[in-house]
Amino acid sequence: MMIIDGSNHIFGRLASVVAKKVLKGEDVFVVNAEKVVITGKKEAVIKKFRRRLGFVTKGNQALSPKFPKHPDKLLKRSVRGMLPYPELRGRMAIKKFKAFIGVPKEFEGKKLEQIQSALSKPEHRTVTVGEISKTLGAKW
């Protein structure tokens, strides 16, 4: 079982590491999912997510009404996209992953790990997934 503190981890890099671990059969939990960061200019990142969520429309149709808004669900959806989900092993692997907003009581006092290859550097422009979620109207 691996418990990762998502604070200051880059979104995509963290998701790819988690996807590899769950495919190997390991249980992975990510706490503080709202503190995971996405690199880039804040306005550009938010614009991309607004487009995915259907706030920007083409004609009368929203582009994607099924995209999640909450930080934990955004991370889970990203991990799922990196798994062979249509296959049985991909569906079994996603069941071994859980993301949480904040630190649940069951993980308080336990050792939280960090993935060194996924940590953000101070010079990167970043925006947290929590900021994006609040901008998109998610209440958590």
Image (cartoon, helix red, strand yellow):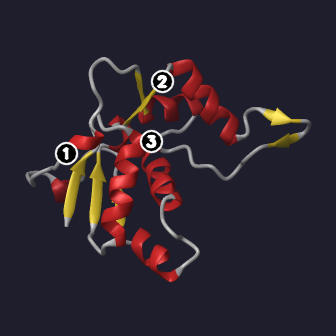
Q: Quadrant of the C terminus?
A: top left
Asked whether disc 3 touches disc 1, contact meaning CB atoms under 8 Å apart, the reply is: no
Specify the label residue 140 is tagged with: 3
Up-down: is 116 above or below 111? above
From what the image shows, is residue 87 above or below residue 71? below
Q: Is residue 72 left or right of residue 35?
A: right
Q: Which residue is found at the position 48% from the left and 24% from the top?
A: 40
Instruction: Measure the alpha-carbon separation of dots 1 and 2.
Output: 22 Å
- Which of 39/139 is in front? 39
Residue 49, horizontal then vertical, whole percent:
60, 35
Q: Position of residue 60 (x, y in %)?
A: 90, 39
The kind of residue on which mark 3 rests is Trp
Q: Nearer the viewer, residue 135 or 76?
A: 76
Rendered view: 93 above or below 103: below
Q: Residue 70, position in %: x, y?
A: 49, 45
In the drawing, what numbered circle is on residue 40? 2
- The residue carrying pointer 1 sits among few (fewer than 14), some (14 to 19) or many (20 or more) residues within 10 Å by Cα, namely some
In-image side of 88 versus 125 (left or right): right
- State left or right for residue 40 relative to residue 14: right
The secondary element bearing badge 3 is classed as: loop
Q: Amino acid at mark 1?
A: Gln
Q: Earlier in the sequence, mark 1 or mark 2?
A: 2
How many C-alpha atoms fall within 10 Å of the one at disc 3: few (<14), some, or many (≥20)? Answer: few
Lower sequence index among marks 3 and 1: 1
**Would you identify the image quadrant in which residue 25 lies?**
bottom left
- The residue closer to the viewer here, 86 or 51, is 86
Q: Amino acid at mark 2?
A: Gly
The residue where tag 1 is placed is 114
**Residue at 8%, 51% in the rendered image:** 109
How far apart marks 2 and 3 lie (CA) works out to 24 Å
